[in-house]
Image (cartoon, rainbow, N blue to C red):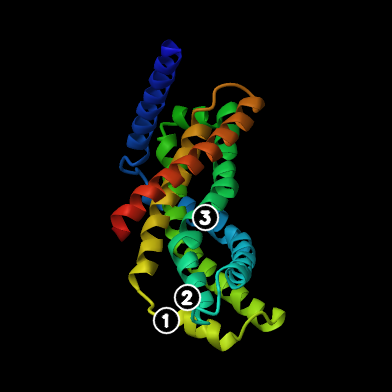
Amino acid sequence: MQQKYKNIMIKLISILGKYIILMGRVFSRPERIRVYFKQYVNELYQLGINSIGIVLLISFFIGAVICIQIKLNIESPWMPRFVVGYTTREILLLEFSSAIMCLILAGKVGSNIASELGTMRVTQQIDALEIMGINSASYLIMPKILGLMTMIPFLVIFSIFAGIIGAFCTAWFAGIMNATDLEFGLQYCFIEWYIWCSFIKSLFFAFIIASVSAYFGYTVDGGSISVGKASTNAVVSSSVLILFSDLILTQLLMG
């Protein structure tokens, strides 16, 4: 049993070392800025703009469900009527629109990055770039990291507004509470720092999603089956690291 844990630790340390070495190659100085900029703009669209739809849809329904759950399970005659709006806002700002949304994006964006790079590896396209003297790690991975980190604050904003609209739609159409009370609760004791906390955390999460997924895709060894395995490992590893870093960042930012 002890030997098993020792082998696991050796494997984790080996993966961490390879990841750090790869990131060193990724952030080396680009040879031709214009080519990298075209890749960066393409990744903005592929990773960011293409994710707006799923972010809006999920955030809308989550905001509505949070509002209903709080109304039914938390509100009581002893609490102010605006507590539903206040609690809904805090949940959206502090956790859902940063951490939970990035967990969702880890499944969509992370698997996409890992499968794309993994396919390029098994079809020897990455080897062809290396033969041409191109730093393939920097050329393929850095635009993805920068693109996702650029778009993530906008996705956070979209998520917050969609969640709030979902809560309002619940109040208006389901008639579970007065929309005026909900509005007052959403504005009550608003702390601007919470918005910045969401942005800061989401930037870290975006880096984790892009870099970890790119690592598993870039280092694929084998055929098409290995690509699927790398995609799964990328999503699982990104999700675990997001939850772990969320714990640390929340303590640092809110402590």
Residue type for callout 3: Ile
Q: Where is residue 190 in the image (x, y as percent from the top left)?
A: 38, 77
Position of residue 30 relative to residue 249, above or below, is above
Residue type for callout 1: Tyr
Residue at the disc numbered 1: 188
Spatial CA distance of label 3 from label 2 is 19 Å
The 10 Å Cα crowd at callout 3, few under 14, some 14 to 19, many 20 or more, is: some
| SS assignment at label 3 | helix
**Is tag 3's residue or tag 2's residue first in the polypeptide sequence?**
2
Q: Which mark is residue 100?
A: 3
Q: Where is residue 188 in the image (x, y as percent from the top left)?
A: 42, 81
Nearer mark to the viewer, of 3 and 1 = 1
Position of residue 135 relative to residue 60, above or below, is above
Q: Residue 86 carries which label?
A: 2
| SS assignment at label 1 | loop
**Is tag 2's residue or tag 1's residue first in the polypeptide sequence?**
2
